[in-house]
Amino acid sequence: MLEVTQSRQPCWKLNDRFGQADMARRVQRTGRTGWYYRVIEPGAMRAGDEVILVARPHADWSLARLIGTLYHRTLDAGVLREMLTLPLTPSWLKLVNGRLARRTVEDWTARIDGPAKQD
């Protein structure tokens, strides 16, 4: 049994992997960023196995909505405050609280373009 724990944030490693300087930015723009799983019950799976939804405790908050908030509705204070009601990871709590406190979006340059592009 698996649990989706959070969406991924695309980073410069996608640019390197695919040899495209703007790949991370393109992935972020499309919202097809992927996600992380946590193993709840270990077992075996292989290609073609059926995946069955067991529960969706925060049905109003799909990954698409989270991604849309993070990258498109970046400073919508009402939506950001609502996001704080979710069991977010510490890094995402810091991100959302920072946006609310500063009323600005964090600099994405290092994450999207890579550490050498920060200058």
Image (cartoon, rainbow, N blue to C red):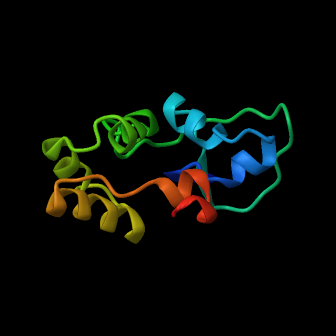
Can see residue 39? no
Report whether 87 appears left or right of 44: left
The answer to whether residue 64 is above or below residue 46 is above
Front residue of 73 and 23 = 23
Q: Where is residue 54 in the image (x, y as percent from the top left)?
A: 53, 41
Q: How many marks?
A: 0
Residue sitting at x 26%, y 50%: 83
Residue 13 image offset from top left, x and y in percent: 70, 54
Which percent across, then down, holds residue 67?
A: 42, 40
Q: What residue is shown at x 61% (from left), y 43% (from top)?
A: 24
Q: Which residue is drawn at 32% across and 40% down?
A: 69
Q: Is residue 93 positioned above or below 112 on the image?
A: below
**Residue 83 can be seen, yes or no:** yes
Relative depth, front residue between 50 and 7 = 7
| View extreme (front): residue | 119
Indicate left or right for 12 with 110 as reference: right
Instruction: Note whether 17 is above or below 119 in the view shown.
Output: above
- State the image quarter where residue 63 is shown: top left
Q: Which of 71 and 46 is in front in this view?
A: 71
Residue drawn at (23%, 53%), measured in percent from left and top? 104
Q: Where is residue 23 in the image (x, y as percent from the top left)?
A: 66, 38
109 up-or-down from 101: above or below: above
Q: Is residue 49 left or right of residue 51?
A: right
Does residue 20 appear to the left or right of 59 in the view shown?
A: right
Viewer-closest of 83 and 57: 83
